[in-house]
Amino acid sequence: MMFKVPRGTKDLLPVETGSWQAVESLIRETCRLYRYEEIRTPVFEQTELFTRSVGDTTDIVQKEMYTFEDRGGRSLTLRPEGTAPVVRAFVENKLFGSPDQPVKLYYMGPMFRYERQQAGRYRQFVQFGVEAIGSDSPAIDAEVISLAMDVYQRAGLKDLRLVINSLGDKESRNAHREALIRHFEPSIGEFCSDCQNRLQKNPLRILDCKVDRDHPLMKTAPALTDYLNEESAAYFEEVKTSLDALGIEYVVDPNLVRGLDYYNHTAFEIMSTSDGFGAITTLCGGGRYNGLSEEIGGPEAPGIGFAMSIERFLMALEAEGKMPETESKLDAFIVALDEESRKEAVKILGNLRREGIAADMDYMGRKMKAQMKAADRQKAGHVIVIGEDELKNGAAGVKNMADGTQETVEFARLAEALKSRS
Ligand code: ATP
Ligand code: MG
């Protein structure tokens, strides 16, 4: 029996983890510049947290959740997204009581969705996301969008398209909802069964349907932007003004609705426009979620955030030829020529590492030539050779692999000598 990695998941081997780490540190550094601090929540939560917040007419809740009963009979779900858990933690830990408002958080970790596997779509994927909770200033919307764009741009991406829209407040959404029902109701029989269910429950979701996306009524559907009340329209204007102030380019797309129920006012997506990117072009999605905190039992705490997957981030870097270069290098490799030398090598290796020098040796009993090759493969800066003579003299031959120079250094002074050269 051969075991395989579960469908929709993948192993990240050392040839890939280097670029992952590079992207992760760039993300952490960008968050530091914006004063967003890391939060880590569990990978599973009470199922109801998601059905309530994400919404039970959404694809995520209807089709994509990994839900199971634990041995105590509780219904738990592997988190499909990060916002609801973070807001849950914000409420439960009373972060709303902190003097520093809004509370600015970021997370990075695996999410789980039962999806059909294709390029850029996995069942376990890693999302980086931020949440700014506690302020409804339009300037914070712009800050959050700016952070997302900054992460991509600092990584070297150029082919980006930022699309924004406003979903308005409750009043605007209700007006739009009525208009959508009037628009779709006469022909709802031509739509998929999901859409038929959505018509009364949540007609906005119809616009997000992947089955009926080419139906002619989709194009002529009433746009949300035409139903914004004065307050919502003014809010949207201010978000745009703040984006302008930050020098961020954007396109307004009145058809942009997001796949989760809790969004209102600002919604945005960042796409890759790179030729090499493939069919799915969305890199990042986010929006404002005033009311979510109350929905899950917390105080009023308006919030905004986004999420992006590292998988699609790396696909965009690949498409634009901007994959971070990551070569792990060794400072020194010890070549030991016989059993006695090996024992000395173990001792020296320990000393070098204690002094902060990255070093390795052969454990396969290889011949000298094969050991030299291993040193080469591992891009060792120096090779230290120990054999019978070296043992007798208590000094090893140290070869600088960059310029080929060689010198003899006492065992006790090896760390010092290597440090002075790097
Ligand atoms: P889509 O329309 O592509 O299904 P979504 O609306 O489900 O996207 P969000 O829930 O907004 O996506 O997630 C935000 C980001 O997370 C996406 O823009 C994408 O980068 C990433 N993402 C979502 N689902 C997956 C997945 N299954 N595999 C990899 N990345 C994903
Ligand atoms: Mg999806």
Image (cartoon, helix red, strand yellow):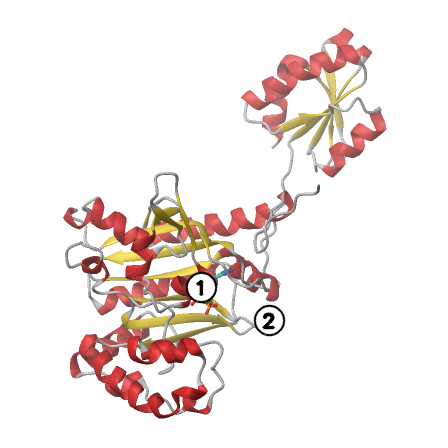
Q: Depth-wise, is mark 1 or mark 2 nearer the camera?
A: 1
- Please state which amino acid type lies under the numbered disc 2: Gly
- Look at the numbered disc 2 and say if its residue's Cβ is closer than 8 Å to ligand 1: no
Q: Mark 2 points at which residue?
A: 278
Ligand 2 shows up in which quadrant of the image?
bottom left
Q: Which sits earlier in the primary sequence, circle 1 or circle 2?
A: 1
Q: Residue 369, position in %: x, y?
A: 85, 29
Q: In which quarter of the image is residue 372?
A: top right
Mark 2 surroundings: few (<14), some (14-19) or many (≥20) residues within 10 A: some
Look at the numbered discs 1 and 2 and tell me whether their residues touch, using CB distance below 8 Å: no
Q: Can residue 149 be seen in this view?
A: no
Image: 393 above or below 180: above
- Please state which amino acid type lies under the numbered disc 1: Lys
In the rendered structure, the answer to whether residue 82 lies left or right of residue 160 reads left
Q: Residue at x 60, y 66 (%)?
A: 319
Total numbered labels: 2
Label 2, secondary structure: give it. Answer: loop
Q: Residue at x 23, y 83 (%)?
A: 228
Image: 331 above or below 397: below
Q: Name the residue under label 1.
A: 63
